[in-house]
Amino acid sequence: MGMGTGAEAKMEYKRVMLKISGEALMGDQGYGLHPPTVARIAREVKTVHDLGIEICMVIGGGNIFRGLQGAAQGMERATADYMGMLATVMNALGMQAALEAEGIFTRVISAIPMDQVCEPYIRRRAIRHLEKKRVVIFAAGTGNPYFTTDTAATLRANEMGCEAIFKGTKVDGVYDKDPKKFPDAKRYDTVSYDEVLQKHLGVMDASAIALARDNNLPIIVFSLDEPGGFRGVLEGKGTYTRVHG
Ligand code: UDP
C-alpha cells in the first residue's frame, strides 16, 4: 500500500488520455450504446475540456463485440479481433456525436483507414488537433489483432506525449481483490507496475502495463460512475489509485 493521494494534488496536467471500456457506454442495458449514458460521460469530459486540458480518448468495444468471444465460438481469432476493432469505431462515433452536442470539437482517428467515416491516424496531425483543443478519439485500437484497447490507449498516450492515462472504471481504484465480491478488499492509493503484473491486479492487460512501465507513464484508475469524478481526480481530489514506477 502506498501513501496518501495528497502528494499528487498539485500535479497540473496539460494533455491526458482517458480510457474507458465499451461497457461504460451501455448503461444498464447489457449491450450496445445507451445514449443518456454516453451523454453523461461527454459532460464529464466537457468539465475537463473547460479547464483547457488537451484530451485524447480511447473507447473499447466490449459492449458490442470482443474478439475472444468470437474465437471461443469457433471464429478465427484474427477475424474476430477485426470485428472488435470495428466495434470501437462505432463507439467512437457515438461519443463524438455526444461531445459535439456539448459544443466540443472532436476528431475520430482510426488505426484502420476508413476515410468516409473518420480520419486515418497520422501522428503529427493528431497532435495538431490536440493543440487546437479538439478532443481526439482514437478508434480501431492499435489496428492489429491480438491486442486490446488498453494497449492502444497506452501506445497513443505515449505517442501524443500525454502525462498520464486516466482509466475510468466502475470502481474507484485498484483493489487487492474484487471489492464487489469481498467486503474486506483494500484499495491501493499507489501501486507499482511490477506489483500489478506480479499480483495480476487486473488494471489493464499485461502488455499495456509493460508499455506504460517502460515509458514511465502513470495510470490513474478512478470511478467513472462518480459524478464529477474525472475532473476531481485531475485536480487530485476524491479516491483513485495511481500506478507508477
Ligand atoms: N482489438 C484488437 N486490437 C486492438 C484493440 C482491440 O484486436 O488493438 C479487438 C479485440 O478483439 C477486443 C475488441 O477489439 O476484444 C474490443 O476491445 P477491448 O476488448 O479492448 O474493449 P473493452 O474491453 O475496453 O470494451
Image (cartoon, rainbow, N blue to C red):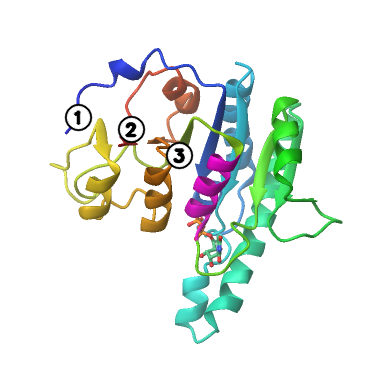
Q: Secondary structure at mark 2?
A: strand
Q: Secondary structure at mark 1?
A: loop
Specify whether 150 is left or right of 195.
Answer: right
Q: Nearer the viewer, mark 2 or mark 3?
A: 2
Mark 1 and mark 3: span between their CA atoms?
20 Å
Other-residue count near label 2 (Cα within 10 Å), few / some / many at <14 / 14–19 / ≥20: many
Using the rendered image of the protein, determine whether residue 19 is visible from the camera's viewpoint.
yes
* Residue under the point 19% across and 29% down: 2
Return the residue at label 1.
2
Q: Any atom of ligand 1 within 8 Å of the CB at mark 2?
A: no
Q: Nearer the viewer, residue 157 or 29?
A: 157
Amino acid type assigned to the residue bearing label 2 in the image: Arg
* Residue under the point 43% across and 37% down: 217
Return the residue at label 3.
168
Other-residue count near label 3 (Cα within 10 Å), few / some / many at <14 / 14–19 / ≥20: many
Q: Residue furthest top?
A: 10
Using the rendered image of the protein, determine whether residue 27 is visible from the camera's viewpoint.
no
Q: Nearer the viewer, residue 84 or 190?
A: 190
Mark closer to the chain start, 1 or 3: 1
The magenta stretch spans residue 221: no
Mark closer to the chain start, 2 or 3: 3
Q: Residue furthest left?
A: 184
Q: Quadrant of the C terminus?
A: top left
- x, y percentage for residue 47? 59, 21
- x, y percentage for residue 84? 59, 66
Q: Secondary structure at mark 3?
A: strand
- x, y percentage for residue 206? 36, 57
The magenta-colored residue range is: 148-159
Return the residue at label 2.
242
